[in-house]
Image (cartoon, rainbow, N blue to C red):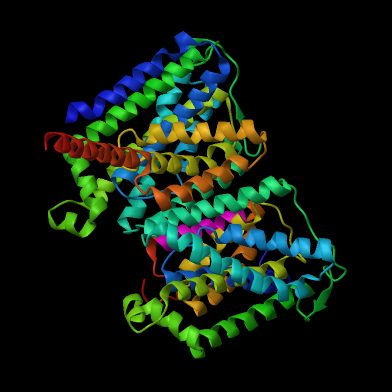
């Protein structure tokens, strides 16, 4: 059972890894890099939201921290880009742990948790838009230095393989969490905190650990974004757009499943791209579609696309077995 | 620095601003009190109402105060329909789903407006926009004094509806005990939708009060909604009197922190207060119990 659940994902990842060998098209690679970036950020959201049941509306707080920590270290302190990337991830984890410690200690859950995460992301956005160290309203531009040592590359393929490796790592981590004792605790807390407490689980500590891992993954997305685009400002790094994409992809793909975020990111990004081609690149239109998709999925497919797929598989199996019975009889 | 000639006008202006905040929060707290959901589309609906008030003036030359008469029932219908035909059916009665559906609505409305009207900031030009009244210790803008008065009237009307009408009594019954209310023959889906409609109607009034001295762009509602969340939490979720007091309080805090910290840091004052209240007193400063 365990082996069967990973192999299709592994196949998809291997197939994705071969793409740059088949095409040198920048359009294709650029699309896939951005899709995988969303998949990574969304996988981070999924750890906390999907497995832990804590719906964050402010994952931008971690995305932005990853990006800003890395940018500030590189541009203000001359730190190597790879080291800055790692420290950006660590910075995101620290912020996640700090916010988690505050909110879970106060027992905030449900709507209150969504509200407080949203507020933290907004506080960071406003601070980043006025503080001199973040470049205030101007943002931070990373100096062009197209060498692998500087985490910058001539072509898009190396970026593509790096983000694919990050997504693969995140999937492996989530797979491991799903099979571990910690994962079982997390799901127990999601289903009922009181019941989890009764069997000796400390919900606040379990949620805190989940939030730290979640924040680290999302921060990796932010730090990668910086290397890929070489520019961030407060609206990009801490803006609500990333918080929305982070939760939209897992919900579309299937909340609390290993490959839901990747599947969701692929669907959502493809949808966005198709809209752009049909109606032209108008500001706001892609988000209108995303909002509509969110409502439709919640209304008609609460378990996302993976829920629909397993439903379909079950249906086909039933049809087959009844057909087999009929042919025997 | 604490000279009364600066302080007193700042406090008075804070109270006037706070009244409009209170009205926005009143809609939010009403919906929370009865439906027990946080309406994340509240800010986007306020933006929509501001656009409506703007175009009523631009296209038909309607004075914003006159436009209230048309927009209030119109937004009641919009809110009623949203809850009855979108949020209610889509959410399947699960809190998490309601969060997501209202977030989806917010994203759609806000970006739909962005798509239709671009990011431009618009204002209406009214000859009384800069009129002031001298109250001895300070000069106060006439439109904001009017807004203050209207908010008090609206709060009174809401209180009368909740206390004395059958619908209001049904709303309070549903808020207290949904199942019990349903068993005694109350149409819960209808009451939910009426509540959502009333909450949205509050936004139409707030928009008409704001537009003479404020501006509108597709993101303008966001600033208000986080303030409104703060007020709702501060005043105790679901408490009408609490959000009125909370609104006035936040208005004064904003005015004073803006005076001493500058405008963009003044905004942070509100968020910090919001987070602190959520963390340490989620039942609110004036609320009885969460």
Above or below: residue A102 compared with residue A9: below
The residue at 57%/71% (across/down) is: B247
Q: Residue furthest right?
A: B127
- Residue A283 figure quarter: top right
The answer to whether one can see residue A93 in this image is: no
B180 horizontally vs B51: left or right: left
| Foreground of the two, A100 or A18 | A18
Above or below: residue A71 compared with residue A98: above
- Asked if the magenta segment contains residue B272, the reply would be yes
B69 horizontally vs A108: left or right: right
A156 horizontally vs A95: left or right: right
Return the x and y of residue A139 as percentages of the image width and height. Answer: 62, 33
The residue at 88%/69% (across/down) is: B127
Q: How many marks?
A: 0
- Asked if the magenta segment contains residue A101, the reply would be no
The residues colored magenta run B265-278
| Foreground of the two, A226 or A40 | A40
Return the x and y of residue A203 as percentages of the image width and height. Answer: 23, 52
Return the x and y of residue B180 as percentages of the image width and height. Answer: 32, 80
């Amino acid at each position: 059972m365990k082996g069967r659940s990973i192999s299709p994902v592994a196949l998809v990842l291997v197939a994705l890894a071969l793409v740059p060998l088949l095409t040198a098209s920048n359009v294709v690679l650029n699309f896939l890099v951005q899709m995988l970036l969303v998949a990574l950020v969304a996988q981070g959201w999924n750890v906390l939201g999907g497995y832990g049941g804590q719906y964050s509306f402010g994952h931008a707080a971690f995305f932005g921290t990853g990006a800003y920590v890395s940018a500030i270290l590189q541009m203000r302190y001359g730190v190597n880009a790879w080291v800055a990337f790692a420290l950006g991830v660590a910075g995101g984890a620290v912020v996640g742990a700090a916010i988690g410690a505050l909110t879970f200690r106060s027992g905030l859950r449900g709507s209150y948790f969504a509200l407080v995460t949203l507020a933290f992301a907004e506080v960071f956005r406003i601070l980043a838009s006025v503080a001199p160290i973040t470049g205030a309203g101007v943002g931070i531009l990373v100096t062009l230095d197209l060498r692998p040592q500087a985490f910058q590359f001539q072509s898009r393929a190396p970026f593509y393989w790096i983000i694919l490796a990050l997504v693969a790592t995140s999937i492996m981590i989530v797979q491991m969490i799903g099979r571990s004792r910690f994962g079982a605790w997390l799901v127990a807390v999601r289903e009922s905190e009181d019941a989890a407490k009764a069997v000796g689980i400390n919900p606040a500590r379990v949620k805190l650990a989940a939030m730290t891992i979640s924040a680290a993954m999302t921060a990796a997305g932010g730090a990668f974004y910086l290397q890929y685009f070489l520019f961030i400002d407060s609206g990009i790094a801490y803006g609500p757009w990333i918080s929305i994409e982070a939760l939209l992809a897992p919900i579309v793909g299937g909340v609390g499943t290993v490959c839901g975020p990747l599947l969701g990111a692929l669907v959502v990004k493809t949808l966005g791209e198709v809209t752009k081609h049909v109606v032209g690149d108008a500001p706001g239109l892609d988000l209108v579609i995303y909002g509509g998709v969110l409502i439709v999925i919640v209304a008609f497919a609460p378990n996302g696309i993976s829920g629909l797929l397993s439903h379909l598989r079950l249906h086909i199996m039933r049809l087959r077995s009844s057909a087999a019975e009929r042919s025997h009889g | 620095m604490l000279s009364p000639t600066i302080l007193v006008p700042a406090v008075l202006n804070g109270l006037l601003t706070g009244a409009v905040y209170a009205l926005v929060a009143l809609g939010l707290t009403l919906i929370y009190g009865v439906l027990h959901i946080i309406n994340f589309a509240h800010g986007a609906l306020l933006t929509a109402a501001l656009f409506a008030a703007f175009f009523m003036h631009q296209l038909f030359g309607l004075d914003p105060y006159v436009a209230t008469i048309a927009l209030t029932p119109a937004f009641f219908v919009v809110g009623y329909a949203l809850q009855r035909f979108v949020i209610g059916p889509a959410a399947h009665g699960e809190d998490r789903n309601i969060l997501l559906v209202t977030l989806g609505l917010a994203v759609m409305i806000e970006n739909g407006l962005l798509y239709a009207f671009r990011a431009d900031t618009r204002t209406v030009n009214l000859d009384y926009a800069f009129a002031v009244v001298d109250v001895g210790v300070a000069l106060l803008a006439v439109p904001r004094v009017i807004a203050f008065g209207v908010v008090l009237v609206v709060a009174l009307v809401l209180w009368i509806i909740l206390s004395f009408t059958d619908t209001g009594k049904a709303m309070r019954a549903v808020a207290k005990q949904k199942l019990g209310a349903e068993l005694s023959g109350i149409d819960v889906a209808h009451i939910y939708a009426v509540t959502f409609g009333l909450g949205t109607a509050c936004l139409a009034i707030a928009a008409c009060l704001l537009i003479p001295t404020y501006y509108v762009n597709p993101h303008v509602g966001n600033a208000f909604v986080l303030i409104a969340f703060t007020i709702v939490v501060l005043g105790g979720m679901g408490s009408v009197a609490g959000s009125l007091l909370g609104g006035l309080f936040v208005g004064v805090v904003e005015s004073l922190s803006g005076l001493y910290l500058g405008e963009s840091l003044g905004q942070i004052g509100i968020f910090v207060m919001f987070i602190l209240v959520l963390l340490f007193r989620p039942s609110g400063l004036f609320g009885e119990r969460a």
